[in-house]
Image (spheres, helix red, strand yellow):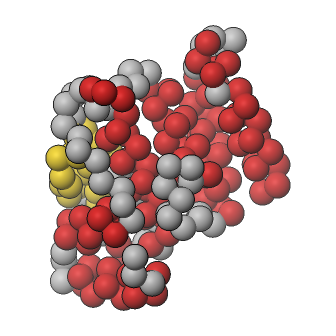
């Protein structure tokens, strides 16, 4: 893998040329995020600093596209890499062989990955500000699972880790 500073320069250069999809494709290859269920990227409206929306779209069990803002790479690269990793988790979850049907479980798993980088350890850490935001979102999705359900029980140890992390960030 290239050095992080070299990657930033490469990203900035291609972003300035309007090559957002090319940059995103490079990053999923460079950071080994790709998955056979990934169909490709499409652009969506520009993001604002307080609202960056990326989505994974496609039917469960079918190929998935990731829609990213056309100005994705105007924002900090470590955050964008974490958001791309989040969406690639969803691509995997929606593959027939690894299907996760419950949306709350999918979001829980993706936010947990953003916080602890178990599947993608090469992704850089988030800022404490974003860790706090992502931990809060993870807990929101955990709490949307049926109270006392098998699903909540499945993730109770991870929930404790998220709560411990969050307590260190406050």
Question: Going 39% across and 65% down the picture, which residue do you hit?
Answer: 31
Residue 80 falls left or right of residue 63: right
Question: Going 49% across and 35% down the picture, which residue do you hit?
Answer: 107
Question: Going 35% across and 26% down the picture, which residue do you hit?
Answer: 99
Residue 105 image offset from top left, x and y in percent: 50, 27
Q: Which of the 4 image quadrants contains residue 58? A: top left
| On screen, residue 120 above or below 3 | above
Q: Which of the 4 image quadrants contains residue 7? A: bottom left
The residue closer to the viewer here, 108 or 72, is 108
Answer yes or no: is residue 46 visible. no
Residue 118 falls left or right of residue 3: right
Question: Going 27% across and 26% down the picture, which residue do you hit?
Answer: 96
| On screen, residue 98 above or below 10 | above
Number of marks in picture: 0
The residue closer to the viewer here, 151 or 67, is 151
The residue closer to the viewer here, 97 or 17, is 97
Query: Quarter of the image containing the C terminus?
Result: bottom right
Residue 10 falls left or right of residue 80: left
Residue 119 image offset from top left, x and y in percent: 50, 49
| On screen, residue 83 above or below 110 | below
Answer yes or no: is residue 41 visible. yes
Query: Quarter of the image containing the N terminus?
Result: bottom left
Residue 167 image offset from top left, x and y in percent: 82, 49
Residue 30 falls left or right of residue 124: left
The residue closer to the viewer here, 87 or 92, is 92
Residue 145 image offset from top left, x and y in percent: 58, 19
């Amino acid at each position: 893998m290239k050095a992080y500073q070299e990657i930033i320069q490469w990203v900035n250069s291609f972003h300035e040329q309007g090559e957002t999809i090319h940059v995103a494709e490079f990053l999923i290859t460079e950071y080994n995020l790709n998955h056979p269920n990934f169909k490709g990227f499409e652009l969506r409206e520009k993001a604002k600093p307080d609202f960056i929306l990326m989505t994974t779209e496609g039917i469960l069990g079918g190929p998935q596209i990731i829609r990213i803002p056309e100005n994705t790479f105007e924002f900090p690269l470590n955050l964008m890499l974490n958001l791309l990793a989040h969406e690639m988790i969803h691509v995997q979850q929606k593959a027939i062989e690894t299907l996760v049907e419950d949306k709350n479980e999918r979001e829980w798993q993706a936010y947990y990955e953003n916080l602890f980088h178990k599947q993608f350890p090469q992704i850089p850490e988030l800022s404490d500000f974003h860790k706090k935001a992502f931990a809060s979102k993870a807990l929101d999705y955990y709490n949307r699972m049926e109270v006392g359900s098998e699903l909540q029980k499945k993730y109770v140890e991870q929930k404790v880790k998220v709560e411990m992390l969050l307590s260190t960030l406050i």
